[in-house]
Amino acid sequence: MSLTPALRQNIEQIRNYLYGGGYPNPAQNAEQLSFLIFFYMFEAADAAQIRSARRPGAAPYTSAFNGQWKLKNPLNAKDRGAEEVPRELLRWSNWANGLNGERLVTWVRDEVFPFYAAIAAKGATDFMDGARLGIDEPTVLSQVLSQINDLHLETMDADTKGDLFEHVLRQIKQAGELGQFRTPRHVIRTIVEMVDPRIGETVYDPAAGTAGFLVAAYDHIRLANSSDSGVQEGLVDGKTIKRGLGDMLSRDAFAQLQEATFYGNDVDPQMVRLATMNLFLRGLDKVRILRRDALTRTLNKAEKAERGLPADGFDVVLANPPFSGRLDANRIVEEVKVGTTTQTELLFLQYMLNQMKDDGRCGVILPEGVLFGSTGAHKELRRKLVENNTVEAVLSLPGGVFNPYSGVKTSVLIFRKGGTTDRVMFLHADNDGYKMDANHDTPIDADDLPMLAEAFVAREQNWQTWTSRDEADEWTEKWWFADTDALRAADFNLSAGRHRPQSRSQVEHRDPIEILDDLKAIEREILDELNELTGLVREVVR
């Protein structure tokens, strides 16, 4: 089943009704919908566990709706003076269909939320910690519940439910206060294809956001382990993609994929909730997204064991860490420090390197300034990456790929932990399959990403093509290489444009938008250096 136009329209109706009813914040609306969807889905999940417990040899299970519920608000009692009610009354089918007006609001606010918060607290992630009802206008709440009923979520497969929730998340059009924003899913899929996580490996996103990278890695591994008959095509964001059922995985392997493969954390509790719901709807309810700031608090071995984290690091790290953030220097943990910098993108890069196993792989989106910045921290981190690790590729993304959240020019850095870099493959995308306007959500035919991902996969063969080329001929491919000597001579500059083979026609006809994007990145880098210098001067003056 795919996300049909009718389903998208239903979600749009919910969004429009919330907006028109006085709830204009898309992020908060997505969070509220995640809670309500959880309440709706839990009733079916509870029934499924009851059926499963009846099988011979199955573990016993007691329904969450058995017994009595001690009321949080005595005014919610039907009988005056009663302190308890049957837990059956907390089923979605009872209150969502049987209550209305102020009584509905008080019941959901005072009883339903605490009831399901207690259930969520026993799960992999306590994603309802501190949750409360935000839709407190009776008519709006009643209508939203009715519209959720009309979705018939219980009839959908996990992928469709996940796509539907992703459609909700797409309405979040503003970056968060910490510089975080939703990464376009087609960009994520390209990065995952290049890094190629496999069954049996652990995958980690230290700035998980809404769990886009983890979901894409899950889809990638399932597709790689699917028979021809287990592969389906569907339309996502106006583009046809392939998905696999993972039908070639054994039961144990599939259990490992769902329960002991994916890990993540985020500092924003709202993102933890949205990520958990995104994973829950796809059958990944055992994946734990921690709420923590990885740059200001370290975990020792005992704490890692308590949280179920691999003691020796991760096989694959995938991330789009927050851009343009800064931390108080006194809060930064020692192991992620890079010189005196307080820039989060540099600190996150060092942190990710620390979290990888030897020969582990990483795909990370970075602002362009990280690749050519001239501060000591920038140069030292790039030198460490090139000389003490294996930088495999830099993919230059089109300017505007993160609209409407940010206009920052970005690139993708792909590397392995350990070894040394002999050469780096540079790839340049002019188009990513979507119109480069303010919203960046209109599909177009021009798309360099699939071709560039294929070029990276075939990089050994392409290296032979590159080294055997006639240097007098114009190079027309959107990929090229630079060896370590060239990188060292350029102060370990890893910007794709710095190493691009030039010709007269390319110089004369260079896209002015690309030039402007480069100038913006340089200006931002200068401002960052001035801010850092100002901080150092203040310390000296004190």
Image (cartoon, rainbow, N blue to C red):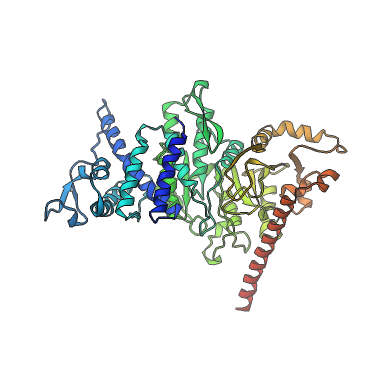
Q: Residue furthest top?
A: 229
Residue 268 place in picture, x, y as percent: 46, 55
Seen at 83% across and 48% down, the residue is 508
Decide: is 195 above or below 532: above
Quadrant where the image shows the N terminus: top left
Quadrant where the image shows the C terminus: bottom right
Drawn side of residue 144 relative to residue 443, left or right: left
Which quadrant holds residue 529? bottom right
Seen at 51% across and 46% down, the residue is 205
Drawn side of residue 252 relative to residue 452, left or right: left
Q: Which of the two residues, 6 or 27, is positioned nearer the viewer here? A: 6
- Is residue 268 at all visible to an observer of this figure? yes
Drawn side of residue 171 relative to residue 18, left or right: right
- Is residue 291 at all visible to an observer of this figure? no
Q: Which of the two residues, 88 or 395, is positioned nearer the viewer here? A: 88
Q: Residue furthest right?
A: 472
Decide: is 345 above or below 417: below
Residue 71 place in picture, x, y as percent: 19, 53
Residue 200 place in picture, x, y as percent: 50, 34
Which quadrant holds residue 67? top left
Residue 254 place in picture, x, y as percent: 44, 30
Figure disc tally: 0
Q: Which of the two residues, 261 or 218, is positioned nearer the viewer here? A: 218
Q: Residue furthest front?
A: 20
Seen at 42% across and 38% down, the residue is 284
